[in-house]
Image (spheres, helix red, strand yellow):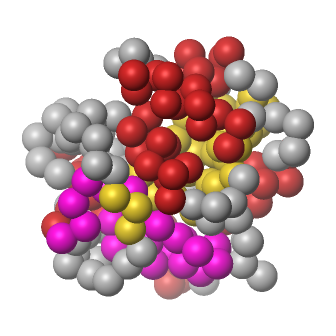
Amino acid sequence: MAFSLPCVLFAGGKSSRMGRDKALLPFGGYSTLAEFQYRRLEKIFNHVYISTKDAMKFPFAASFIIDKSDVFAPTAGFDAAFESLSQERFFALGVDMPFVTQAVIKRLIQADSDDVDATVAQTQGKTEALCGIYHRSLHKRFEAMLANDEHKLAKLLNEAKTTQVPFGQKELFLNLNRPHEYQKAKEVYGIMANEKEAK
């Protein structure tokens, strides 16, 4: 059964460390990492949206949330998501985290509650800010962060009422920020695909 809360895939960053738009890199048999993520998340959630500044750059049909801010930071995407969606909460995932599993998402949803502002993953003491559930109670804080040019999600989560759910498998939260991480992710995905075929 698919999860009822919406999922927002964050793909509006500058990708400055990668040197090119990582959302458009080929991955997992798809022409873009964004489509790989979108297609697999469609099987997990009833509604999936891609947060971006330019929907036209994606070579596939999808539901988009357009971030019209000139700020290249997740804070702008969160503000746009809360403006666009009517739901009280949504699941946020970075486009560059292709190994976050349905089991991880399910555990985060089960850990979430109405009396918190956010529920996010944590690995080895590190907050995985772009893998978790954000509540509308944070919308005004995101607006204030944008107005003050403050964009540290970890600081926001530390000040808000946040549930951090610890996970032991750090490789599930591999970020594709730099070229060598992209190459490693492709290798890991290839190994996983081969193991799946062998079963």
Q: Nearer the viewer, residue 49 or 100?
A: 49
x, y percent for residue 6? 62, 65
Q: Quadrant of the C terminus?
A: bottom right
Q: Residue at x 73, y 71 (%)?
A: 3
Query: Is residue 182 found left or right of 77 in the rendered image?
Result: left
Count of picture labels = 0
* Residue 165 is one of the magenta-drawn residues: no
Q: Quadrant of the N terminus?
A: bottom right
x, y percent for residue 56? 18, 70
Q: Nearer the viewer, residue 39 or 65?
A: 65
Q: Residue at x 20, y 78 (%)?
A: 59
Q: Quadrant of residue 44?
A: bottom right
Q: Residue at x 27, y 34 (%)?
A: 71
x, y percent for residue 90? 64, 55
Rendered position, 1 above or below 100: below
What span is colored magenta in the figure?
34-56
